[in-house]
Image (tube, rainbow, N blue to C red):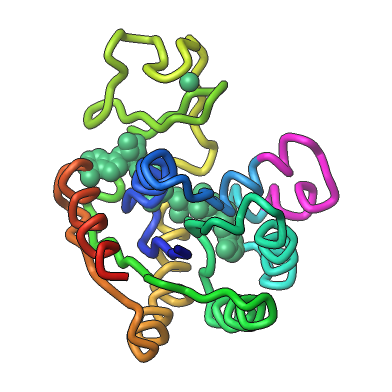
Amino acid sequence: MNLILLGPPGAGKGTQAQLLQHERGLVQLSTGDMLRAAVASGSELGKKAKGIMEKGELVPDGLMVGLIRDRIAQPDCAKGFILDGFPRTEAQARALDQMLAETGKKLDRVIEMEVDEKALTERIVGRYTCAVCGTGYHEKFKRPKVEGVCDVCGSKQFVRRKDDNAETMKTRMAAYRAQTEPLLPYYSGRGVLRKVDGMASMDEVHRQISGLLAGA
Ligand code: ADP
Ligand code: ADP
Ligand code: ZN
């Protein structure tokens, strides 16, 4: 099964992709995580993406399409993948359609996660992540069971994203509205779009998504 999780920054895409990955054995393809790894490694892609990401703007389509093309060709993606953060523009969506057609794969569902803008900012400014295993946390909505210790791997190191601040959030929201929202009619026209209430609790959102996948 191949899925896209679509929604504004902070909607809960990464959180839900992690849950689905563990439960269904699908591979989570987060372009944000892939880009942050490229920045950390100092690769050519990382050098190009760093400043753009810090401003909250979108990395050029050509770079993103190349990144995803290489990744979904890997053997671990044969069982299915969850795209989290891609596509973000119509050009990326068209390129994805073409890649899937070329490799005989199909898109089963695009899940739209709807969240109020005020809640998004609160989610973004309180977000942090385990530096070792990447599990996501939130100051208010998802604290580790033992304070300061990752539930999954026991690490005591956590990181915050440089772009997770109220100022950059404005640019990211504007990019979402202008460039990503047009994907909703694009996928709705193909009959694969389904909507969940992203304002609900993490468990409830997960239940809603699972329900929508049952018939896919
Ligand atoms: P969020 O989940 O908060 O929306 P991401 O981690 O998906 O953020 O993305 C972080 C940044 O990485 C984006 O603001 C953008 O600069 C870049 N990025 C990630 N995915 C894409 C993409 N598909 N196209 C262009 N830029 C991207
Ligand atoms: P995205 O990948 O769409 O940018 P994340 O999954 O990283 O979003 O979620 C953003 C922040 O909000 C994280 O700190 C996460 O723990 C928290 N979060 C995710 N889903 C919910 C939810 N349904 N209710 C409250 N907080 C949430
Ligand atoms: Zn961890």
The stretch of residues the image draws in magenta is: 37-51
Predominant secondary structure, magenta span? helix
For this rendering, which residue is in front, 55 or 25? Answer: 25
Horizontal side, residue 119 vs residue 173: left or right: left
User: Which residue is at 67% across, 72% downward?
Assistant: 61
Quarter of the picture holding the C terminus: bottom left
Residue 186 at what x, y percent from top left?
41, 86
Residue 176 at what x, y percent from top left?
43, 67
User: Which residue is at 22% across, 42% downward?
Assistant: 202
Find the residue positioned furthest to the bottom: 189
Residue 195 at what x, y percent from top left?
23, 69
Say above or below: 209 vs 88.
above
Quadrant of the rendered structure where residue 137 is? Answer: top left
Quarter of the picture holding the N terminus: bottom left
Horizontal side, residue 104 vs residue 66: left or right: left
For this rendering, which residue is in front, 201 or 174? Answer: 201
Residue 113 showing in the rendered view: yes
Say above or below: 91 vs 117.
below
Say above or below: 126 vs 60.
above
User: Which residue is at 19% across, 41% downward?
Assistant: 203
Residue 168 at what x, y percent from top left?
47, 50
Q: Is residue 86 magenta?
A: no
Q: Is residue 42 magenta?
A: yes
